[in-house]
Image: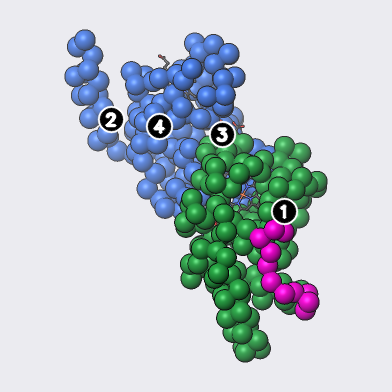
Amino acid sequence: MRKPLTILIALATTMFAGATLADPARDAILAKFAAEAKAADPGFTGFSAARGGAFFRASQTGGSAETPSCTSCHGAAPQDAGKTRANKAIAPMAVSKTPDRFTDSDKVAQWFDRNCKGVAGRVCTPLEKGDFITFMAGQ
Amino acid sequence: MHKAPLAAAIFVTVAFTSAGAEDSFPPVGNATVKTECSACHMLYQPQMLPKRSWQAVVEGLAKHFGEDASLPPAKTTEVLDYLVANAADAGRSGSKFLRDLPAAATPMRITETPYWLRKHRELRPEIWKRTSVGAKGNCQTCHQGAATGDFDEDRVRIPK
């Protein structure tokens, strides 16, 4: 069991290092999602920033009517600050603007859980989470 | 013009009274509360609601004003313990947010307490609709020192 995971982590790390801003903690989070995505679908070949961008902007149903999209709070442009329903500013999701984004695995898990339910009424898949972070890391 | 030294004197007094005492809103001293309860809005001081309210707020975090603000069990307990230990009715004298609050009432909002309502009664309804204000709970838009517990009426500035 150990070996394939190690290979996957190595693979994931090299795959993302080129296009995105690297950070060991973020790479480890991505590698974990990659392992989960591979377990869910053996045909998984890697995360896609394009898919992540589309997911970020998609209008979804099943969650709260007030927040149909990730952009409802995070704003349309990842480089800009967003705003909560209570009107507090949210630092940009783009890693180039907020370098410590997606580096605390508990925080990442907690907010994916809350926000996916709030937007789509369900948890996000490992593929969606990995795509999302890959997209933001390249922004 | 003699107000400034007086205000300063009052401020110093207020700053040094112990937690739970009247007028005193010391900065929140628990890291988990600070992180988890300031992500979506300003960090509210526990001295502004009674214990029973914090109990209800924390128990209802999964459906918190239409949002999922739930926490893992260990964090939930830590947050609740801190809020209850520093609640309006935790100190010996009690915070002014208890004034006129019926014993049977469990307000879920600071902005529903009789004391808060009385202090803001003179503000025209139009003010709350300004996008610069956003919500009654955005204390910091008018009380710039809200985060550090400064709600003195001499330092209020209502945004246009």
- First in sequence, mark 1 or 3: give its number: 1
The tint of chain B in the picture is blue
Marks 3 and 4 on same chain:
no
Q: Residues within 10 Å of mark 4 (few under 14, many from 20)?
A: many
Residue B80, x across and y down, in percent = 51, 49
Return the chain for callout 2.
Answer: B
Q: Measuring 49% from the left and 11% from the top, which residue is drawn there?
A: B122
Marks 3 and 2 on same chain:
no
- First in sequence, mark 4 or 2: give its number: 2
Residue A44 among magenta residues: yes
Residue beneath disc 4: B146
Magenta region: A41-51
Residue beneath disc 3: A87
Foreground tag (1 vs 4): 1
Residue beneath disc 1: A55
Picture quadrant of residue B140: top left
Q: Residues within 10 Å of mark 3 (few under 14, many from 20)?
A: some
Q: Residue type at mark 2? A: Val
Dots 3 and 2: beta carbons under 8 Å?
no
Residue B137, x across and y down, in percent = 53, 30
Element under label 3? loop
Residue A76, x across and y down, in percent = 64, 42
Q: Measuring 48% from the left and 50% from the top, which residue is drawn there?
A: A97
Indicate whether A14 appears above or below B63: below
Q: Which mark is residue B14?
A: 2
Dots 1 and 4: beta carbons under 8 Å?
no
Q: Residues within 10 Å of mark 1 (few under 14, many from 20)?
A: some
